[in-house]
Every structure is written in C-alpha cells, then in structure tokens.
Amino acid sequence: MKNINYSRRIKECIAASVLLLGLQAAVGAETGTAETLTTEKKFSVGPRMTYYAPQDADKGQWSPGVQARLHLSPDLALEASIDYLHNDFGGLTTIKTFPIQGSLLAYITPGDILKPFLLGGAGWYFTMVDGPFGYSNSTSRFGLHAGAGVEVVLNKSLYLSGSYRYIWLADIVSRDASALHRTYHDSGSMVTLALNFSF
C-alpha cells in the first residue's frame, strides 16, 4: 500500500511539473505575441468610442471615432485620431466638435501582454455652436492634451486599448441675436476605448 502511495505521489509531482512547464511556455508564447506586435507589425487602425465631459456641459456623451497608431520602436508610438463630440450646455446651446488629435505614446512595459503607456500631444478642434434665437457659428481651436492608457494584446493582429486624457481648450463665447453672450468652458476629460487591427 505504501508503494502504491509513493508511486502515486511521484506521478502527481511529474504531472505538476509538466503543468508548470506548460504554463511557463504559454506565458512565453503570449509575451512573444506582444513583442511581435510591437516589432514586426508597426501600424494599426481601428474604431473607438469616446466619452467626453467638458467642464460646463450638463453631462458627458459617448461618441464614435477612429484611431491609427504607428510604432516607432517597442517603447514609442505615434497616434492619430478623429472623433465626433456632441454636448449640451444648459439645454439652450449645443456644441458639436470634431477633434483631430496627434499623440506621442511612451510604453512603460513594451514587451508584456498588458502594456500601460503615458501620452501627450495636441489637437485641432473644428467646433459648431447652435444657440438660442437661431444663433449658429463655427470656429477652429487648438488644444493640448496629456494622460495615460493601456493596451491589452489579444493576438498577433488584434488588441484592445483604453486611455484617459485631459484636454485644454480655449473657451467658446456664444452670442445670440439679442446680443446676449455667454462663455462656455470646454476643457475637460476624455476617455477612449478602441479595438485596433495590426498590419
């Protein structure tokens, strides 16, 4: 009976060792996938959803967009994006914005499956304002942004990405037909969720 238990324990130890080696190989393979994405497939593009909450808006809104990334190295990437933002201010004024942003991404752990990064950049914001008494106007503004995010590698051709950034924008002054005016503080927080395809 003792020999049977001893033999069973040896088999259990061997099985556990094989399982650990298999897990180690799987982790190594996944890490290799992340490195392949960074080094071999340098360009990616995909749809994203953007939540933007300006300081003076009644509430934030989810809006559609698209982003593209070009990996300069395992540590650095350039991102270009365009979104459509729509916000209501006090129920009287609606501001629609098309931000075109350029960002530099610096990866903290570039070889991992989970890759956090810091980001910073600038953007051009084409803005349309509709106010009371038939007021309508469009303007273009320049703004800076900074934040952080994370990529999650799914396979060699696909990854999820999420980011937070704060945007500094010039204020909008709305003047209506009765010569009344109000200043809207449009700086605020932006959250993005994206699915990128690598080529």
Image (spheres, rainbow, N blue to C red):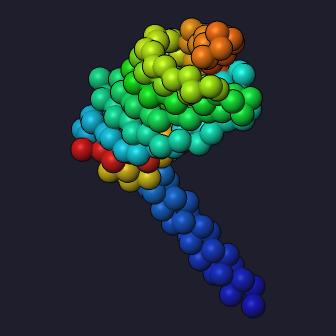
Picture residue at 56% right of the left edge, 70% below the top = 14
Name above or below for residue 76 compared with residue 141. Answer: below
Quadrant occupied by the C terminus = top left
Residue 59 horizontal/vertical position (percent): 72, 35
Is 116 left or right of 54, judged from the image as shown?
left
Picture residue at 51% right of the left edge, 11% below the top = 144
Name above or below for residue 52 compared with residue 32. Answer: above
In the image, 97 versus 100, the foreground residue is: 97
Locate residue 77: give its quadrant.
top left
Q: What is the tally of numbered marks visible in this picture? A: 0
In the image, 129 versus 85, the foreground residue is: 129
In the image, 37 versus 182, the foreground residue is: 182
Quadrant occupied by the N terminus = bottom right
Q: Mark yes or no: residue 54 visible.
A: yes
Farthest residue to the front: give it: 178
Picture residue at 45% right of the left edge, 19% below the top = 138
Locate residue 81: give its quadrant.
top left
Residue 188 horizontal/vertical position (percent): 65, 21
Is 181 left or right of 118, judged from the image as shown?
right
Is 80 left or right of 166, judged from the image as shown?
left
Farthest residue to the bottom: give it: 1
In the image, 168 versus 70, the foreground residue is: 168
Q: Mark yes or no: residue 149 visible.
A: no
Residue 126 horizontal/vertical position (percent): 43, 21
Picture residue at 40% right of the left edge, 31% below the top = 82
Residue 72 horizontal/vertical position (percent): 29, 23
